[in-house]
Every structure is written in structure tokens, then in C-alpha cells.
Image: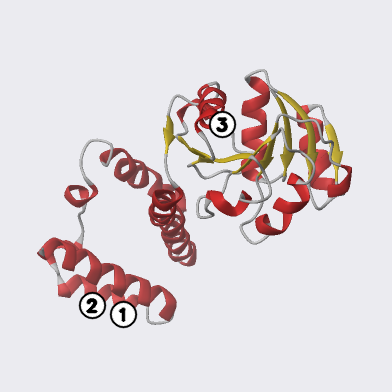
Amino acid sequence: MKVSLIGAGNLATHLGKALADAGNIIEQVYSRTMQSAARLASLLGCEAHDDINKIKMNSDLYVLSVSDDVLPELVPLVCNDRCDSIFIHTAGSIPIDVFHGYANRYGVIYPMQTFSKDKPLYFREIPCFIEASDDDTLRVLQTLCREISDKVIPLSSEDRKYLHLAAVFASNFVNHCYNVAAHITRQHNIPFEYMYPLIDEVALKVHGMSPYDAQTGPAVRNDRNVIDKQLALLSDKPEFMAIYDIMSKGIYEIRKK
């Protein structure tokens, strides 16, 4: 399949590599900056563009992997006069109907993972949630995604927005807690790497038990002696103090039910 990538960010980089490795031809990469487009295009051996009007019109698939606020602006520009192609976006929280009225065949491929350009990933382990405008297009996306992933799951826009919400809690918010922990350890000259075994064990634990059963710590018992002392340690960082307080109350309230 001939593919055009609209966007050259983290997700586009990994998805583009996976598609190319599966034997698809990446024809071109578009980005608002030529530097970003050229970097990914060089990696994939294709053309780079920073002018949307110079995008070729003969690709089988156009992958729009851009920020949520830019996507609605780009859809009418990319879909224009390309009636036989399939258009997809990769956003977790944008519904499929962003393409309605602009394309005949369209869909969504949402690979649920956190992506960094220079951090290698084994794409076959990443679940890909797909949706399409019609059954034939869905079959095409299923075939394409099975070339790059062992987990291909049809999912509606309505359910996908909740999946994305859950992912924010499981990834973005958790990583922010790592950042808070790193700040605390750094302030007291304790290497953050000492946290690695703990972080790894918690992540592995929920593979075999529910997060509810895996929860430990003073908040489970509502141990006010420990909780109040630790809140006091955060008095110079009210934003961290607020997180600690909200999380502790949330843990205890769930355990009470």
C-alpha cells in the first residue's frame, strides 16, 4: 500500500517505521516545518513537504497524525480531490466523523502507547484500536494493522474516548507522579534510579492482579500519623501537597466501598 504521512511527530515516526517495515511504501511526509518533515522522510526514504498543497494525490492511504486542534483544519485540505483514497487519523479523543463530508472512505487507527521518537518500541505488542466508515474500509484497516500489530481491536468513537481517558490516568498522570518523586529525591541528593525496582514491580504486579488488590501504602489504612507527617514535608510545595491529599483520600474512599 502507498502511504502518505501527514505529521512527523512521535506517533507518526513509529507508525511510519512499522508500516514501512511491513512492506508498505511511504511516499511522502508532510509537516509544518521542513526540518521535522525532512528528518522523518530521511528515515523512511521518501519525499518531505512543508506545503500541504504539494502533497501528491495518488496515495492509497493518508495518515493524519497531528495534534487534536490542528486535525479539523487539515482534513478538508488533505482530503480535497482524493476521492479513491482512505483517510485515517490516529487521535484517541477525536471522533471518526471529523472526516464526514470530506472523504468517501475513512477511519481511525489508534495505537495505544506512549511514543518518543528516539525510544525504540516493538510495535507488534502495541494494541491498535480501529474504526471505519464502512465494512470494506474496516477490512482494509484490519489487514493493514495485522501486518504491524498482534492486537487489532475494532472500537467505536464513543468507547475510544473513554479508552483515551483511562490511558491518561494510566500513563500521563502516573508519569507526572514519577516527576514529583524525581523532584523530591533530587532535592535531597537521592538518585531517582533507586525508585526503578519499585516502579517495575508495581507495573508488573497489575499484570497478575487487579489495581485494586495491588494497592498498598498508608492511604489504604488511612494511617493519619504517616499521612499528616508526609503532608507536612510537602508544605513548601502546595501543588505536590494537593496531589498527595487528593490521591490519599481517593485511595481510602475506594477501599471503603
**Vertical arrangement, residue 16 with respect to residue 116, above or below:** above
Residue for point 22% across, 64% down: 251
Q: Tell which of 164 and 39 is nearer to you.
A: 164
Total numbered badges shown on the rendered structure: 3
* Amino acid found under the numbered disc labelled 3: Thr
Residue 137's label in the rendered image is 3
Residue for point 42% across, 51% down: 167
Q: Horizontal placement of 102 versus 234: left or right? A: right
Q: Tell which of 101 and 179 is nearer to you.
A: 101
> Circle 1 sits in a helix, a strand or a loop, which is it?
helix
Between the residue at mark 3 and the residue at mark 1, the CA separation in whole angstroms equals 57 Å
Residue that carries the numbered disc 1 in the rendered image: 232
Q: Residue 243 location, x and y as percent?
A: 36, 71
Q: Horizontal placement of 189 versus 47: left or right? A: left
Q: Nearer the viewer, mark 3 or mark 1?
A: 3
Counting residues from the N terminus, which is met first, the one under dot 3 or under dot 1? 3
**Vertical arrangement, residue 23 with respect to residue 18, above or below:** above
Mark 1 touches mark 2? (CB < 8 Å)? yes
User: Which quarter of the rendered picture does the N terminus lie within?
Assistant: top right
* Amino acid found under the numbered disc labelled 1: Ala
> Circle 3 sits in a helix, a strand or a loop, which is it?
helix
* Amino acid found under the numbered disc labelled 2: Asp
Residue that carries the numbered disc 2 in the rendered image: 228
Q: Residue 101 location, x and y as percent?
A: 65, 51
